[in-house]
Amino acid sequence: MAIPWRHCWRWTIGATSTSVLETICGFNGRSATFAASSFRGTGAGTGSGKEGLSSRPVDTTSIGNYILTSRHKSRLLYPTPKPCCSKGIHSDAKLKDPFSLAQKDLNHLYDDIKKELFVSKSELKSLCDYYFDGKGKAFRPMIVVLMARACNIHSNRDGDLLPGQRSIAMISEMIHTASLVHDDVIDGSNKRRGMTTINEVWGERKAILAGDFILSAASMALARIGNNTVVSVLSQVIEDLVRGEFMQLGSKENESERFKHYLEKTFKKTASLIANSCKAVSILVNSDPEVQEIAFQYGRNVGIAFQLVDDVLDFTACASQLGKPSATDLKLGLATGPVLFACQQFPELHAMIMRRFSTTGDVDRAWQYVLESDGVDQTNYLAQSYCREAIRQISLLRPSPERDALIRLTEMVLTRDK
Amino acid sequence: MTVIWFRLKCIGLLNRGQRNISIFSNATPSNLNKVVSDAEKIVGYPTSFMSLRCLLSDELSNVAMHVRKLVGTKHPLLSTARGFIYDSRKNLQMRGLVVLLMSKAAGPSQHTASDLLPQDMVSGIYPSQRNLAEITELIHTAFLVHRGIVNLKEWTNSDGPLKDMQFGNKMAVLSGDFLLANACTGLAQLNNTKVVELISSAIGDLVQGIYHEIPNRLEDNSLTDEINMVTWEEQTFLSHGALLAKSCQAAMELAKHDKDAQGLAYKYGKHLSLGHKLNSDLQLFVKSSSADPVTFSFNSAPVAFHRQIVGQERWCHQLQQAKTIGRQMDYTKLRSTIKLEKGVTSTIDLCRYHGNKALESIQCFPSSEARSALENIARAVTKF
């Protein structure tokens, strides 16, 4: 079991493992501060994993086991960051539940979004409204409103949302939905959230148009906020989403480049929206670039963690829970976190990755390899690290129920099962 | 740069057997071509190279490589790509040119703002206005590409392998999205939220207009829908007029010209687009060149007028009469039938009406080279 641990460090750290050990040994109620640089888009460094470990005269066994056992348990139960972070970092004022805190702001969110989708032709209207039925998780708007309130409080105002901030919550959900509609056409999916996809019901041409319309409505709402910086920040998201999709078209030859490519793609496709929405709401209330950076970094780290867990769930959850079938990524030819980690133990996966699992039997074999390896564990562990960083960032803001809810939210990201 | 042009040209040269949805069926009269190329000199550079920056991006050269795999298939993206770069005569980036000419015709701004300095003007046009012209073309192209997506459920064996259609769709969605994303970031850089709102609403209009074009039945032309010229104009404005109208207005806003100027620019854009669409719909009915195979949409203006004039019953009857023994539509025969009634002349009248409206609007601007060019374009659109 020691081997996978070493592998894990090799992937996650640009620094040597000695400093990591120091951190582990030294954290008594300090938040585990992994070098922030290791998460700024760099993937696999080929760290001097093995040598560092053996040369360091520290009793790693007990700590190692502690972490290992919790990770071992986590194989089935999805790890909470308990041993690694929460103890003593923040006072345990009751951590409020993010959903209930955000509730009043999100109450009419979907109805308001539908009002923005002002279109005369009734069929197009039903397509655009299709996913705004209130059954989605509303995860992104929730983060946005909580971040807005936390920033407002930090900036010496009362917590209430500025109108522009609420718009941003709506806009982020609209941009997200528009991209989903297009993704379903690109991937040829016929199910989403337990519903038949728009392209399956009405055809690809209308689906694409519906996505374009939602995007244009989001853009109009964005313009109406009246802030040029906010418009730039969120337009960047639209570009990142497309570039992320393009990144998925290509595969990288080099193993170490692959992970970096994967993390960058994950940022563009998932985290950019959350990070930039958080940044946008902070811009509206606070001109201090440090505050804006905190908001951005929280969003970025949570976003990446969210996607990593999503990638894990693709392997571990069964079809009925997700509302869509699993091993989807493999079937689409995509090599995500668990596969990339599993490559270490099963080099056969390299060739499969390069041919995008196109040969008959590749998908099943790869799936087996992943489940036999510790790819899932390692990905979960990586997700935890990103969450820790998110917590570190958000803790720099003035305390508030919303800030604590955002901290609590990172746990929820890690423990969700759908 | 030459490598990419060459690569894409190869696609055009090698292409065979494309699906007969020619996105570039907008035939244009040669005098309009001449007027446009004269006008290009006024604005400083040939507009056919607009969006070059975008075309040269990694993503699109990536797409170009993938689109090569579509050669020999029937996916419409191939003809879009081909039309886009192969034949510059047909590739009129007219919208962008009109926006540039309008900007120049309106003259310098009355306001003193840091981004509206006289020394920044090139050939009498502010950089932001040039960027807007480019964005307009980006949006137009994005929707040309998105129009070329096929419904997989309508696929038949004669279309070739299904996976080619799937692949072509994927490329079309991605490249259209890429162009739109670039348009969005370009809009953001204009630092004018009114313009962002205006152009975003134009995108919404475009979507609604194109949505109407999609037939609800498997047959390409709906036989039994009533047509109404008022609705026809409204829908055609959405799909063919809104973008140019609102871009012209936006160009005025960028230079902080007043509401009147914005209104006039909008009107010109609107009426010119409608006139141009009517003109291109008419080409098949006023020229008797046997070169092009005759096929036309039942929603094109002369046919739509004709249907309204003769009524549903007679129309259905005429359709029956025009079918060959093999139950195929004989379009040449149908065209002759249509030419016997007043559909064509009504369309010509409507075209002239819009051309004149466009002229009226632009003549409110001070006299200039750019204004004359816009007048010439409006006149060329109404000539047959």
Image (cartoon, grey):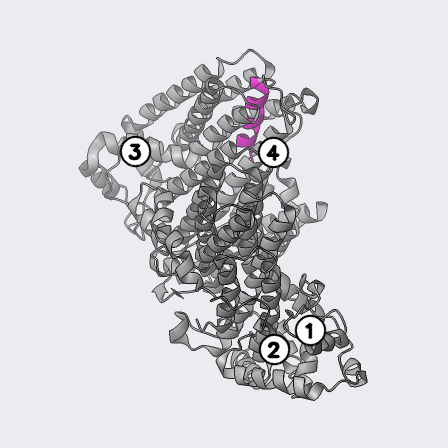
Along the viewing direction, whichever of B363 and A211 lies nearer the viewer: A211
Q: Image height check: is A334 above or below A3?
A: above
- The answer as to whether the residues below labels 1 and 2 share one chain is yes
From the image, tell me which residue sits under label 3.
Answer: B231
Where are the magenta residues, as a range?
A: B90-106
Please state which amino acid type lies under the numbered disc 1.
Trp
Between the C-alphas of marks 1 and 2, the distance is: 9 Å
The local secondary structure at tag 3 comes to helix
Secondary structure mostly taken by the magenta-highlighted segment of the chain: helix
How far is disc 3 from disc 2 in space, using C-alphas?
Answer: 60 Å
Which tag is nearer the camera, tag 1 or tag 3?
A: 1
- Tell me the tag on residue A11: 1
Using the image, name the chain to which the residue with label 3 belongs. Answer: B
Residue at 58% in and 73% down: A87
Q: Secondary structure at mark 1?
A: helix
Tag 1–tag 2 contact (CB < 8 Å): yes
Circle 4 SS class: helix
Frontmost residue, A371 versus A115: A115
Label 2 lies in what chain? Answer: A
